[in-house]
Amino acid sequence: MREPSVVAALHEARRDGRRARIDDSPLRLDGALGVQLSVADSFLAAGERIGGWKAGSTSGRSRDALGAGFRPFGYVLESRISRSGVALPLDGFARCLIEPELCLILGSPLKGEVDALRARAAVRAVAPAFELVDQRVVGGAQDPANFVADGMGNWGIVVGDDTPVDEGLGSGIDGIALDLRQGGETVARATAGRDLTIDDPFLALSRACSLLAEHGRGMQAGQAVVTGSFVPAVPVDAPGSWTAGFSGVGEVSVTFE
């Protein structure tokens, strides 16, 4: 499958919530981010907007899985950013997985090669969030280039109420505890720095921004950036409600129908 066909297949799969088969793709990891941005441009040409980004490969087993220090980004469509409490149809996904994450809200644009200090200065707030991941690419998890080209599997995000950044992350991420509940029953708990290794959110933001700059892109004020899951992605195989509470930050919830 030639690159333009890969872009079209990934665009249609993300748009329609179905799988894309690109097993014979000649994609290489070092070119996958460019393909991803070409897919994003297809959405922009159709009238969509980029509402945010994901900083990928920042926590748990995913850290350095694609190469030492390599933290690929993924784009988030503005139309796929929902407020806490939203109800979403499961049939809009090829296969849905959910990841509880902290989300940084930019108060000013962030462009170019930046360090964590400058990245933090651009952030106005932190919020609890779910990243919704969709397994669209057949064999995508086994093919890193295809997975990266497909926006790191992002479908969208659900964002709770935000908190001023100095209140929510004034002491850093270590010690922030997650309580993940399904239908009111706790299914997972994790504390950053104790139960999992996760990149500092501002470092994750700076790496994503710097990598975007290599492709001539940047981040805009108001965009939301999810910074890494506190637990491995959890499959959503049936309708039901999910809630994630982060100590000192707040709660976010989503219902699948």
Image: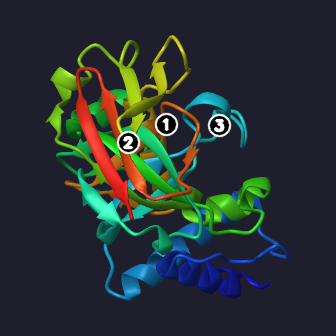
The quadrant the N terminus occupies is: bottom right
231 above or below 55? above
Residue at which label 3 appears: 62
Residue at which label 1 appears: 229
| Mark 2 vs mark 1, CA separation in Å | 20 Å
Dividing the picture into quadrants, the one containing residue 216 is bottom left
Residues at circles 2 and 3 in contact by the CB criterion of under 8 Å = no
The quadrant the C terminus occupies is: bottom left
Where residue 238 sits in the image (x, y, percent)? 51, 57
Q: Is residue 60 left or right of residue 46?
A: right
- Of tags 1 and 3, the one toward the viewer is 1
Q: Earlier in the sequence, mark 2 or mark 3?
A: 3
Q: Is residue 84 visible?
A: yes
Residue at which label 2 appears: 183
The amino acid on which the numbered mark 1 sits, given as a three-letter code, is Ser
Residues at circles 1 and 3 in contact by the CB criterion of under 8 Å = no
The amino acid on which the numbered mark 3 sits, given as a three-letter code, is Ser
Where residue 149 sits in the image (x, y, percent)? 63, 65
At mark 1, the secondary structure is strand
Q: Earlier in the sequence, mark 2 or mark 1?
A: 2
Q: Nearer the viewer, residue 142 or 134?
A: 134
